[in-house]
Image: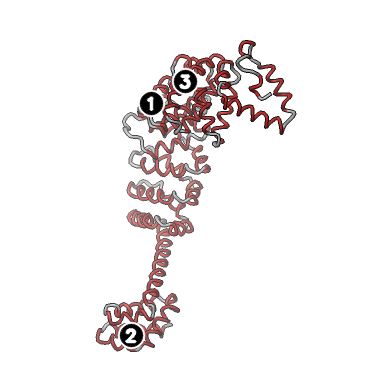
């Protein structure tokens, strides 16, 4: 190998003198030998491939030598050498830089972390960093007191947090607990919110938040009066964390929930209402939400409220239907049902999600005291129409079947259901199918009909045959 390096170095020195290039180019066998050595042994020695590539580089300046270079496929071979050099350089640089992270020089650490951040935008570089324990080394630096170094570390962690494996390493190295301390410093909160959001996207990551007080801190950050704009990362983090029942319970017991609800109503940000929807699943939250129900009705009825916002408010209503008499009185004393009927008509059946939430709501609030108002609102007829239009959508059909079944239990709403001939015949056909495959079910069904049969006055309007018997 040493002899080949010396020989190619001698030829390179000759090639540096342009008057010698023509003589070199005339020896096609020598050029072929150089190209073969570069392809076969260039990977073994940096100096060998440097000498040969330099020779061909000198020849490339003169068009009359280009044909010779093409014949030896020098372009392809050179590109392969460049790829090899890049790979070797990146691997050596990453391994070298990762090891430097244990040094004590602040200036050196800042430069090293900055270089690693630039390299971390490529997946293959992240893999090398992971193999060299990058997260453990950064978890030590994140507790430093130097502002510039800490900012560089947070930016690098932000890039690395998009890799699922590296996120798990951050959880194991208690990065979330370290970030909790940084939330108290306004200079870092934007980066910290973004990093915490990425860590909260996995189920395992969200569980790690239970060991901290980040939930109430996030709620407090969103209710500070001086904060004019709530960043997307902050509210998205709140959405993820409030999916945990324990976090919602802690937030409910904090002092900031009512201020947060007021702020959500003020800004009418759909994501803020998604947070409230998650929290409303907690029984502890419902007493605090009850007094905001009139304001929530105003939000959903505003002409400029988007469908996404209306859906989230409807989901809150559907969580609150278990609140009993207070909620029923609110439905009785407002035109909410009439508004829903108008909304279903104006949406032209395009917004399926809002329609589905209305169907769930009607099925949940139906009762003897509300049934007449449901019938008068026109909601039952709208649902029957939609039921016939969406026969192929299993989710909507199943929910509609359940709600229509609940409405059949009340005389005033059952009249509205059975006056729709197509719906009545579809229900009868469904009963016939069940009877065919489950004959024993017929006895139970007849007993049920006898126990729930309408009065004699109503029975003329709702004949027993409508049930398929």
Q: What residue did someone put label 2 on?
A: 11
Q: Which mark is residue 265?
A: 1
Query: Distance from label 1 to label 3 (Cα)?
Result: 21 Å
Which type of secondary structure does the marked residue at label 1 adopt?
helix
Which picture quadrant has residue 107? bottom left
Q: Is residue 243 left or right of residue 424?
A: left
Q: Earlier in the sequence, mark 3 or mark 2?
A: 2
Q: Position of residue 14 (x, y in %)?
A: 29, 85
Q: What residue did someone put label 3 on?
A: 337
Asked if 144 appears above or below 9 in the picture, the reply is above
Q: Nearer the viewer, mark 1 or mark 3?
A: 3
Residue at position x 46%, y 35% in the image: 213
Residue at position x 44%, y 53% in the image: 137
Figure quadrant of the N terminus:
bottom left
Q: Nearer the viewer, mark 1 or mark 2?
A: 1
Q: Position of residue 145 (x, y in %)?
A: 36, 46
Q: Nearer the viewer, mark 3 or mark 2?
A: 3
């Amino acid at each position: 190998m040493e002899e080949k390096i010396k020989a190619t170095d001698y030829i390179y020195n000759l090639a540096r003198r342009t008057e010698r290039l023509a003589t070199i180019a005339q020896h096609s066998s020598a050029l072929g030998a150089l190209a073969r050595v570069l392809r076969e042994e260039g990977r073994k020695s940096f100096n060998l491939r440097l000498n040969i590539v330099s020779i061909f580089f000198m020849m490339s300046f003169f068009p009359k030598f280009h044909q010779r270079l093409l014949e030896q496929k020098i372009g392809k071979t050179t590109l392969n050498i460049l790829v090899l050099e890049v790979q070797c350089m990146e691997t050596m640089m990453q391994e070298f830089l990762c090891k430097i992270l244990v040094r004590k020089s602040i200036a050196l650490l800042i430069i090293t972390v900055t270089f690693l951040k630039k390299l971390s935008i490529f997946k293959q570089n992240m893999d090398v960093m992971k193999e060299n324990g990058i997260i453990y080394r950064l978890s030590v630096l994140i507790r430093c007191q130097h502002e510039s170094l800490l900012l560089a570390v947070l930016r690098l962690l932000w890039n690395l947090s998009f890799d699922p494996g590296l996120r798990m390493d951050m959880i194991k190295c208690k990065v979330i607990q370290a970030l909790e301390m940084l939330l108290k410093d306004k200079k870092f909160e934007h980066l910290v919110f973004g990093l915490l959001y990425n860590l909260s996207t996995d189920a395992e990551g969200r569980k790690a938040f239970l060991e901290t007080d980040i939930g109430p801190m996030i709620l407090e950050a969103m209710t500070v009066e001086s904060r004019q704009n709530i960043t997307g990362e902050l509210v998205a983090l709140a959405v993820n964390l409030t999916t945990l029942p324990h976090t919602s319970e802690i937030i409910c017991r904090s002092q900031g929930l009512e201020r947060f609800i007021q702020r959500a109503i003020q800004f009418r940000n759909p994501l803020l209402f998604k947070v409230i929807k998650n929290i409303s699943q907690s029984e502890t939250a419902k007493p605090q939400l009850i007094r905001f129900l009139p304001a929530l009705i105003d939000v959903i009825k505003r002409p400029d409220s988007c469908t996404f916002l209306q859906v989230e408010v409807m989901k809150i209503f559907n969580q609150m239907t278990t609140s009993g008499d207070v909620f029923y009185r609110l439905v009785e004393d407002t035109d909410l049902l009439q508004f829903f009927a108008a909304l279903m008509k104006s949406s032209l059946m395009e917004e399926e999600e809002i329609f589905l939430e209305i169907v769930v709501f009607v099925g949940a609030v139906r009762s003897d005291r509300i049934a007449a108002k449901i019938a008068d609102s026109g909601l039952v007829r709208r649902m029957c129409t939609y039921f016939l239009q969406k026969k192929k959508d299993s989710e909507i059909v199943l929910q509609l079947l359940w709600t229509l079944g609940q409405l059949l239990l009340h005389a005033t709403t059952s009249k509205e259901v059975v006056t729709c001939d197509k719906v009545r015949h579809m229900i009868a056909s469904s009963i016939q199918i069940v009877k065919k495959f489950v004959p024993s079910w017929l006895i139970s069904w007849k007993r049920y009909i006898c126990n729930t049969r309408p009065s004699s006055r109503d029975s003329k309007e709702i004949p027993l045959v409508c049930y398929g018997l």
